[in-house]
């Protein structure tokens, strides 16, 4: 069948696709495998191991068990609210958040292989690793101005992880 390209293209916008179907090119097996792999690599990729710097920090922080935080401690920290009590509170947060994230990351890394390859779980794990690295390498807060900056960045981090539970439920 001979076709007029300009007439068919005006009538049917999918004519290029139809033309490709009508006259398929013969592709080598390696080209075909690469194309299929590229299209599906996001869904079948194994989770990336932690980068060396993150792995070392994770090992260091995961060795320490998180310190308990009681209601009495929370109430005592804020009464009276002084610059010293604020700095004590941020010091506690800077010590504990990386420990707790390290524990969470280790838990996700120890999931069975098939669960760990799930793209939703891998996405959450990657987010936890980035947050852990940021928290573990953040310089010690020494004054109230630095505390303001730290809390603003920590608030943004919390917003970044707001949908983690929903994301994991998809997986």
Image: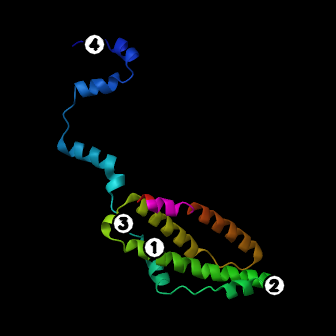
**Would residue 29 be found to the left or right of residue 158 on screen?**
left
Q: Secondary structure at mark 4?
A: loop
First along the sequence among labels 1 and 3: 1
Q: Earlier in the sequence, mark 4 or mark 3?
A: 4
Give the numbered dot on residue 116. 3
> x, y percentage for residue 34?
26, 47
Q: Secondary structure at mark 1?
A: helix
Q: Earlier in the sequence, mark 3 or mark 2?
A: 2
Q: CA distance from mark 2 to mark 1?
A: 36 Å
Mark 4–mark 3 Cα distance, whole angstroms, equals 51 Å
Measured from the top left, where is residue 104 in percent x and y?
A: 47, 75
Instruction: Name the residue located 70 percent from the left edge and 68 percent from the top edge.
Output: 149
Horizontally, residue 82 falls left or right of residue 155, namely: right
Q: Are marks 2 and 4 in contact (CB under 8 Å)?
A: no
Q: Would you name the residue on which mark 1 appears?
A: 105
Q: Which residue shows up at 42% across the image and 59% down it?
A: 120
Q: CA distance from mark 2 to mark 4?
A: 85 Å
């Amino acid at each position: 069948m001979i076709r007029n390209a300009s007439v068919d293209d005006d009538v049917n916008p999918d004519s290029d696709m139809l033309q490709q179907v009508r006259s398929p090119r013969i592709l080598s097996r390696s080209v075909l495998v690469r194309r299929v792999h590229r299209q599906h690599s996001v869904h079948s990729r194994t989770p990336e191991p932690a980068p060396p710097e993150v792995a070392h920090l994770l090992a260091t922080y995961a060795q320490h068990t998180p310190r308990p935080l009681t209601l009495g401690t929370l109430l005592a920290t804020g009464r009276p609210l002084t610059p010293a009590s604020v700095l004590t509170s941020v010091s506690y947060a800077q010590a504990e958040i990386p420990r707790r994230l390290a524990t969470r990351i280790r838990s996700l890394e120890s999931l069975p292989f098939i669960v760990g390859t799930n793209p939703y779980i891998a996405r959450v794990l990657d987010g936890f690793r980035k947050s852990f690295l940021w928290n573990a390498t953040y310089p010690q807060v020494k004054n109230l101005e630095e505390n303001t900056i730290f809390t603003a960045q920590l608030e943004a981090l919390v917003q970044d992880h707001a949908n983690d539970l929903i994301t994991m439920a998809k997986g």
